[in-house]
């Protein structure tokens, strides 16, 4: 099974917080873990915010960024014109924010490309409902 992580779920791999254990367990159970290329700056921004809020030390931030860089060398969904179009349709149909629509489109596109069953892990109720409505498992 493919597990697609939105940026909030992705960050939980590098910062211990509510949802981290679930995210790690789901990643361990997946055959493939993926996210969109646009998750990288979103995750870096979230990690930097946690540093500013003193949740992370400088050293912990550096370790988190190094791990993120290493992990995103693997399966990353690129934002093609086709996926951007699907994201636009999803944003309109499901009342999603732009980046949320991009992530949902990425998960749908990956499932269509591989033919493998996909799950979409996020911690946002509206985005989760949209993913389920589009046929992805939460």
Image: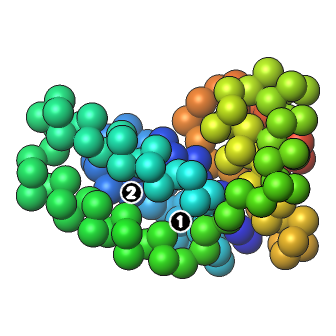
Sequence-first disc among 1 and 2: 2
- In percent of the image, x 83 and y 36: which residue is there? 88
- Residue 20 visible in rendering: no
Labels 1 & 2 near each other (Cβ < 8 A): yes
Q: Quadrant of the N terminus?
A: bottom right
- In percent of the image, x 49 and y 61: which residue is there? 25
Residue neighbourhood size for the residue with mark 2, other residues' Cα within 10 Å, grouped as few (<14), some (14–19), many (≥20): some
SS state under label 1:
helix
Residue that label 2 marks: 13
Count the labels in the image: 2
- In percent of the image, x 87 and y 46: which residue is there? 86
Q: Quadrant of residue 91?
A: top right
Residue 45, label in figure: none
Relative to 18, say whether 82 is above or below.
below
Asked if residue 8 lies left or right of residue 60, the reply is right
* Picture coordinates of residue 130, whole percent (x, y): 80, 33
**In front of the other: 114 or 129:** 114
* Picture coordinates of residue 102, whole percent (x, y): 71, 44
Q: CA distance from mark 1 to mark 2?
A: 9 Å
How is the rendered protein coloured? rainbow
Asked if residue 111 lies left or right of residue 99, the reply is right
Residue sitting farthest toward the front:
81
Q: Quadrant of residue 90?
A: top right
Residue sitting farthest toward the top:
95
* Picture coordinates of residue 108, whole percent (x, y): 83, 55
- In percent of the image, x 45 and y 60: which residue is there? 24
**In front of the other: 47 or 20:** 47
Q: Quadrant of residue 93?
A: top right
Relative to 129, say whether 20 is above or below.
below
- Residue 113 visible in rendering: yes
Residue that label 1 marks: 27
């Amino acid at each position: 099974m493919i597990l697609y992580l939105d940026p909030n779920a992705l960050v939980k791999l590098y910062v211990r917080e509510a949802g981290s254990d679930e995210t790690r367990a789901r990643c361990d159970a997946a055959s493939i873990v993926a996210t969109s290329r646009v998750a990288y700056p979103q995750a870096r921004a979230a990690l930097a915010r946690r540093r500013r809020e003193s949740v992370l030390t400088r050293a912990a931030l550096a370790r988190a960024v190094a791990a993120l860089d290493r992990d995103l060398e693997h399966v990353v969904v690129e934002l093609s014109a086709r996926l951007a179009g699907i994201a636009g349709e999803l944003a309109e149909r499901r009342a999603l924010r732009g980046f949320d629509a991009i992530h949902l489109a990425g998960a749908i596109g990956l499932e269509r490309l591989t033919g493998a069953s996909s799950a979409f892990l996020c911690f946002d109720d509206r985005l989760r409902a949209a993913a389920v409505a589009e046929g992805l498992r939460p």
